[in-house]
Amino acid sequence: MSDLENHFGDDASLDEEDRSDILAFLVRNSAEKSTQESSVKILASIKNKDIIAITDTIFWKQSHKQIPKDVFNHNEVKSSANCKACHSDIEKGLIQDDKIKNISDFM
């Protein structure tokens, strides 16, 4: 949030009020404040590393290691960063096992 003009190669600059509101939301809803199982496990796997992509965490790598690489290249998935392709409840901040799509749909 402190360098939005260089946000992954894009300028995502915001006015101060919007930046402040978004930052407050992010802090309020961060993994450090969550009791969700996935948040706790992701945070524990990060330890003291500066990781900005969930797909770079040990937890993500371990929990997705059985998934064939071709699934992430499927036309409906496109990349490992597209959580919503398989986790239908991710927009609610949830990752529940009973809400994960069957990967055979992408093979």
Image (spheres, helix red, strand yellow):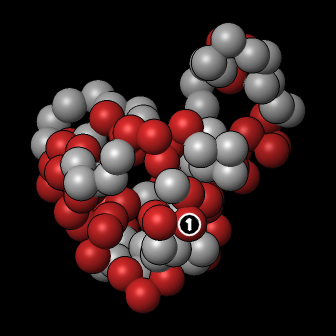
Horizontal relation, residue 36 to residue 73: left or right: left
Q: On the image, which quarter does residue 57 sit in?
A: top left
Of the pair 82 and 54, the residue shown nearer to us: 82
Residue 28 visible from this viewpoint: no
Q: On the image, which quarter does residue 8 sit in?
A: top right
x, y percentage for residue 77? 61, 49
Q: Is residue 34 above or below residue 72?
A: below
x, y percentage for residue 50? 29, 28
Residue type (three-letter) at the residue carrying disc 1: Asp
Residue at 65% in and 20% down: 7
Residue 95 visible from this viewpoint: yes
Of the pair 87 and 75, the residue shown nearer to us: 75
Of the pair 64 and 53, the residue shown nearer to us: 64
Residue at 20% in and 31% down: 49
Residue at 74% in and 16% down: 10
Q: Mark 1: few, some, or many residues within 10 Å (few <14, many ≥20)?
A: few
Q: Is residue 107 above or below residue 15?
A: below
Q: What residue occupies the far right of the structure in this picture?
A: 15
Of the pair 58 and 104, the residue shown nearer to us: 104
Q: What residue occupies the far front of the structure in this picture?
A: 107
x, y percentage for residue 4? 68, 22
x, y percentage for residue 100? 47, 75
Horizontal relation, residue 58 to residue 68: left or right: left
Q: SS class of the residue under badge 1?
A: helix
Q: How many marks?
A: 1
